[in-house]
Image (tube, rainbow, N blue to C red):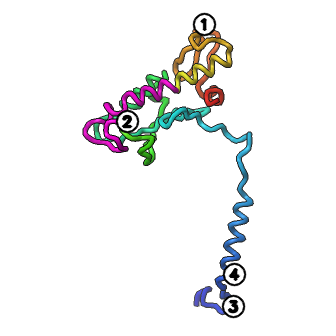
Amino acid sequence: MSIFDRADFAVSRRQLLIGATLTGAGLMVGLRPPTAAAATEPFAPNAFIRIPPEGKITFVMPSVEMGQGIYTAVAMMLAEELEVDLDQVVLEHAPADPKQYANPLLGDQITGGSLAIRGIYEQMRKAGATARIMLVGAAARDWGVSPDACKAEAGHVVETTGSRRAAYGSLIAAAAS
C-alpha cells in the first residue's frame, strides 16, 4: 500500500491549487529586484559584441561553422578591430533572429554557398570598429582629451603620451552612455 492509497491522504483539486499558489507566492517573495550593487551588465554596442567589466569579450557569431573556418576568421576580424588578442575572446552562436543576424548576401540567417565571410565581412569589421571607437571616445571624455590623443591597444585605451591607460571593462559604463 502506497502513501497515495491512504484515505486520510486524499487531496482535493482545490487544496492542490491553493497549495501551489501559496508556494508560487512564496517563491516570488523570495526574489528581489536588482540593486545598484548588482554586477554591471556587459557593454553591448551592437548585436555582435559584449564586453564585460572583467573577463573575455564575447562575439556573437551569426553564421554556423561548417568546416570553412568561419568561427576563427570572424573572431580574428573582430579581435583585430578591437585591438585584443584572440585568446581574449570567446564565441557564442547567435540566437535565431534574422532581423539582426541575417547574412546580407543571402537575405536570411542561413549559412551556405561559401558566402559566410563574404556576406558578413564588412558587417563584422564595422561592429568591431564601432565598439573600439565608442571605448576610445569614453576614455577621451573621462580624461578631457581629444579622441585623437588616444588609441586602443591590447584591450585597453591608452593616451598616446603614455600617461594614462584604462582597461575596456573599466570604460563600459561611460561607453554605454
Say what amino acid the circle numbered 1 marks.
Thr
The quarter of the image holding the N terminus is bottom right
Residue extending furthest toward the top: 161
Q: Which residue is mark 2?
A: 71
Above-or-below relation of 125 to 70: above
Q: Nearer the viewer, mark 3 or mark 2?
A: 2
Upstream in the sequence, badge 4 or badge 1? 4
Q: Mark 4 — residue?
A: 15
Q: Earlier in the sequence, mark 3 or mark 1?
A: 3
| SS state under label 3 | helix
Farthest left residue? 113
Of callouts 2 and 1, the N-terminal one: 2
Crowding at mark 4 (Cα within 10 Å: few <14, some 14-19, many 20+): few
First-in-chain label (3 vs 4)? 3
Q: Which amino acid, by three-letter code, is at mark 3?
A: Asp
Label 3 neighbour load within 10 Å: few <14, some 14-19, many 20+: few
Number of the label disc, if any, that sits on residue 8: 3
Q: Quadrant of residue 3?
A: bottom right
**Which label sits in the foreground, 3 or 1?**
1
Say whether residue 65 is magenta: no
The residue tagged with tag 2: helix, strand or loop? Answer: helix
For disc 1, the marked residue is 161
Q: CA distance from mark 4 to mark 1?
A: 73 Å
Spot occupied by residue 145 in the image (x, y as percentages of width and height): 65, 12
Indicate the position of residue 114 as horizontal and vertical percent values. Answer: 26, 36
Please tell me whether residue 124 belongs to the stretch shown in magenta.
yes
Q: CA distance from mark 2 to mark 1?
A: 36 Å
- Residue displayed at 60% across by 90% down: 5
Please provide percent x and percent y for residue 42.
59, 36
